Amino acid sequence: MYKFSGLSKEDGHKSRGKTGVLLMNLGTPDEPTPSAVRRYLAEFLSDPRVVEIPKLVWMIILHGIILRVRPAKSAALYKEVWTDEGSPLMDISLRQQQKLAKVFEDNDVDASVHLAMRYGNPSTPSVLQKMHKDGIDRVIVLPLYPQYAAPTTASAFDAIAKELCKWRYIPALHFINTYHDDPTFIDALAESIQADFDANGKPEKLVLSYHGMPERNLHLGDPYYCFCVKTTRLVVEKLGLDEKEYVMTFQSRFGKAKWLQPYTDATMEALPKEGVNDIAVVCPAFSADCLETLEEIKGENREVFEEAGGKKFRYVECLNDNDAHINMMANLVKPYL
Ligand SMILES: C=CC1=C(C)c2cc3[nH]c(cc4nc(cc5[nH]c(cc1n2)c(C)c5CCC(=O)O)C(CCC(=O)O)=C4C)c(C)c3C=C
Ligand SMILES: [Fe+2]
Ligand SMILES: [Fe+2]
């Protein structure tokens, strides 16, 4: 006979039996100030999944140059998109969490919905610990990155694994690693673009602008580029666009290396010169509007297009808390509930 002692109620290995869905996204600074942005960027850019340069060399560049210069510049950009509700990414993510919880409630699905960020707050370890305290022993993780990429999706997995490797009794875990070709995602995206076409007329070109990544990652085996190509193909097929009516581009380049091409900003400059003056831009790699869509695309790239002679620029919002998007989330986690 074993004598059990020292087990607190929380640590006891009685059946706990609750299921929790964990939505994850990248994260955002707590405030649009240089010090908060520095804290956020230090965590983000120290992640070896994000910047794959030998650690010692990168730490010297990061702490010696980037974290001295970029926080003030980025904070000024964050200020431009900040609202009374805070960072758009955080505000929208919280609404996504609440709306998915409501869909579960309305459909008698016995699962709670949680939100964790990979960098910043609410941190992934703190949310996992809270779920454990609440008696959840089945966790379904849905990183809200439609196209798998190592710097985003795999990094979300790393954060979970890093926390769980400290636990004695880990929960059952289901990790949804990509949904770039899921029919409910493609339908939601195509419907949102079609709604823009219906309201504003069909543009001469639809620009599908994805977050970029160093080209080297593709050659090392990251499927992100191929998944972006597939999302594009499925969406334009659904919209019935021919080759001349759309272009796929990559934005948010960081550093001096070659990133995936064509670049969004170079395309914005080139299109009016090719006689294309009326475009709609959509960002299918982002599940929520954020700095990269609101400031970089709707702000900066609009200016580049207009300064190059472009006449009509429309930005199609991310799926955010659209009903179709929330239903997509419910559909993605359904097989694991
Ligand atoms: C340094 C390399 C970067 C890689 C690789 C990368 C990949 C990547 N990122 C997203 C989604 C988001 N990125 C966001 C901001 C952002 N991204 C990078 C760098 C890389 N991203 C930086 C330095 C920043 C910070 C912004 C700045 O200081 O200028 C955001 C927005 C966050 C917000 O608060 O609004 C998102 C979302 C994806 C999908 C991706 C995939 C390849
Ligand atoms: Fe990024
Ligand atoms: Fe950017």
Image: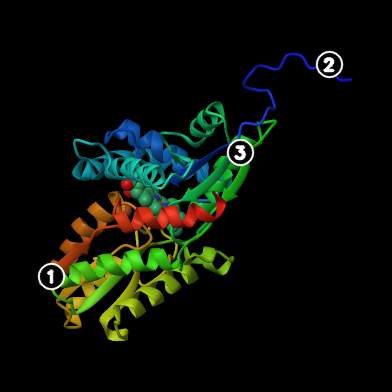
Query: Rounded to the nearest whole Å, what is the CA distance between mark 3 and mark 2?
Result: 31 Å
Q: Is residue 14 left or right of residue 43?
A: right
Q: Which tag is nearer the camera, tag 3 or tag 2?
A: 2
Tell how many labels.
3
Q: What residue would you read off at disc 2? A: 3
Q: Which residue is mark 3?
A: 162
Structural distance between the alpha carbons of marks 1 and 3: 47 Å
Q: Amino acid at mark 2?
A: Lys
| Nearer-N-terminus badge (2/1) | 2
Which quarter of the figure has residue 102? Answer: top left
The residue tagged with tag 2: helix, strand or loop?
loop
Q: Position of residue 104 (x, y in %)?
A: 41, 45
Q: Nearer the viewer, residue 137 or 92?
A: 137
Cα distance between the residues tagged 2 and 1:
73 Å
- Where is 47 relative to 323, above or below? above
Depth check, mark 2 against mark 1: the one in front is 2
Please indicate, yes or no, whether residue 250 appears anywhere in the rendered image: no
Judge: label 3 CB < 8 Å from ligand 1.
no
For residue 331, side relative to residue 69 (left or right):
right
In the rendered view, tell whether residue 6 sits above or below residue 98. above
Name, please, the residue furthest toward the right: 1
Residue under the image location 29 percent in, 57 percent down? 318
What's the mark number on residue 153?
none
| Residue linked to disc 1 | 200
Please report contact status of discs 3 and 2: CB closer than 8 Å, yes or no: no
Depth check, front residue: 31 or 109:
109
Q: Secondary structure at mark 3?
A: helix
Rate crowding at label 2 as few (under 14), some (14 to 19) or many (20 or more) other CA atoms within 10 Å: few
Secondary structure of the residue carrying numbered label 1: helix
Mark 3 / mark 2, whichever is N-terminal: 2
Precedes in sequence: disc 1 or disc 3: 3
Quarter containing the N terminus: top right
